[in-house]
Image: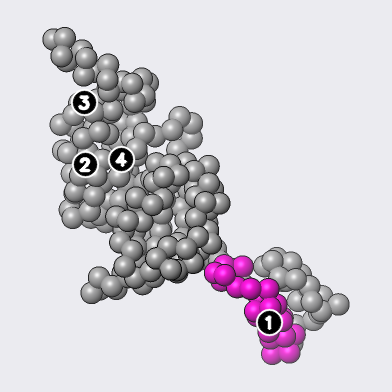
Amino acid sequence: MEVADEQQGRLLAVDSTATSLIVGNLEATVTEEELVKRFQLYGPLASCHVILDKISQKSLGYAYVNYEKAWHAALALQVLDGCTMKGQPLRVAIQPKGPKINALEGNLFINHLDPSITSEQLHMMFSTCGALISARVATLDNGISKGYGYVRFVSEEDAQMAIQVFHGSVINENKISVTQFVPRSERQFVAYIPDLDEKKRNFVIDFNLSVMLHLFKLPLSVVNIVSQLFGFFPLFM
C-alpha cells in the first residue's frame, strides 16, 4: 500500500490537477474506440475524442483523452508517450487549462530540411521548445523526404519560441525556414511563398497587378482595393 501511495505521489508531481491529455501523431485510421481500449488500461476515462476536419471528417491526427483522476492521466502520460500505435509513435502531453486548441494553433511549417532528417529527429529537435502534439517529415510513397515537414505544439507560445529559435538556423548544412502553417485555402498569392526576397517579391507583385490591369481590364481603383485585401503593395498610383 505504501508503494502504491508513493507511486501516486510521484506521478501527481507531474501535475496535481491535470486530468486531460492531448494525444498527437495519430495514424489517420485510429478510432476513438481503439484509443479508449489503449488508454483505459491506466484508469477510468471520462471521455475520448478524436478531432476531425470539419469538412472532410478525416482525423486531424490528434485527440483529447480525459481521465477521472489526475494520477491516472499522469501514469498514461509517462507510459504511453512515445509508444507505437499502428506504426506511429504517440505524442502524449498534458492539456493546458483554458480553451482547447484549434486545428491551426501552434502548427508550424518547416522547409528546406536535409533529406536525411527523419520525423523522429524533427520531434527531438523541436521538443526542446515545448511539448509537441506531432512532428512529421513529408515523404514520397517510397519514403524519401520531400524536404519539408510539419510540427504542432501544444502551446502557441512554444510554437512562437520555436520560430525564433530555429528559423534561419543551419541543420545538416541546410538553412531551414520555420513559419506558421497556413492552409492552402487561406494562402495569399505572395505572402506565403517561403523565403521570397524583396526583389523577387516585388517582381511577383508587379506581375500580378499588371495582369489585373491589362489582362482582366480592371480599373486602377479596383486593383488598389484588391492589392490591399491580399496584402500587396499599391505600386500603381
> Which residue corresponds to the image point at 40% horizontal and 59% vertical from the top-left?
150
Please determine whether, in this image, residue 207 is positioned above or below residue 177.
Answer: below
Of the numbered discs 3 and 2, the one sitting upstream in the chain is 2
Residue 199 on image: x %, y %: 68, 78
Q: Amino acid at mark 4?
A: Val
Residue 42 visible, this angle: yes
> Which residue corresponds to the image point at 16% horizontal and 38% vertical from the top-left?
37
Q: Kindly identify which numbered label has been placed on residue 166.
A: none
Q: Give me the C-alpha separation between circle 3 and circle 2.
A: 13 Å
Please name which of the two marks, 4 or 3, marks the residue nearer to the observer.
4
Residue on which disc 2 sits: 35
Q: Kindly identify which numbered label has been placed on residue 92.
A: 4
Q: Amino acid at mark 2?
A: Leu
Q: Is residue 207 magenta?
A: yes
Of the numbered discs 2 and 4, the one sitting upstream in the chain is 2
Residue 28 is left or right of residue 229, and the answer is left
- Badge 2 marks a residue whose secondary structure is helix
* Mark 3 Cα shell of 10 Å, populated few (<14), some (14-19), many (≥20): some
What residue range appears in magenta? 191-215
Q: Give me the C-alpha separation between circle 2 and circle 4.
A: 12 Å
Q: Amino acid at mark 3?
A: Pro
- Contact between labelled residues 1 and 3, with CB atoms less than 8 Å apart: no
Q: Give me the C-alpha separation between circle 4 and circle 3.
A: 17 Å
Residue 56 is left or right of residue 225, and the answer is left
Residue on which disc 3 sits: 44
Q: Give whichever of 130, 19 is nearer the camera.
A: 130
* Mark 4 Cα shell of 10 Å, populated few (<14), some (14-19), many (≥20): many
Q: Kindly identify which numbered label has been placed on residue 203.
A: 1
Residue 128 on image: x %, y %: 41, 45
- Contact between labelled residues 2 and 1, with CB atoms less than 8 Å apart: no
Please name which of the two marks, 3 or 1, marks the residue nearer to the observer.
1
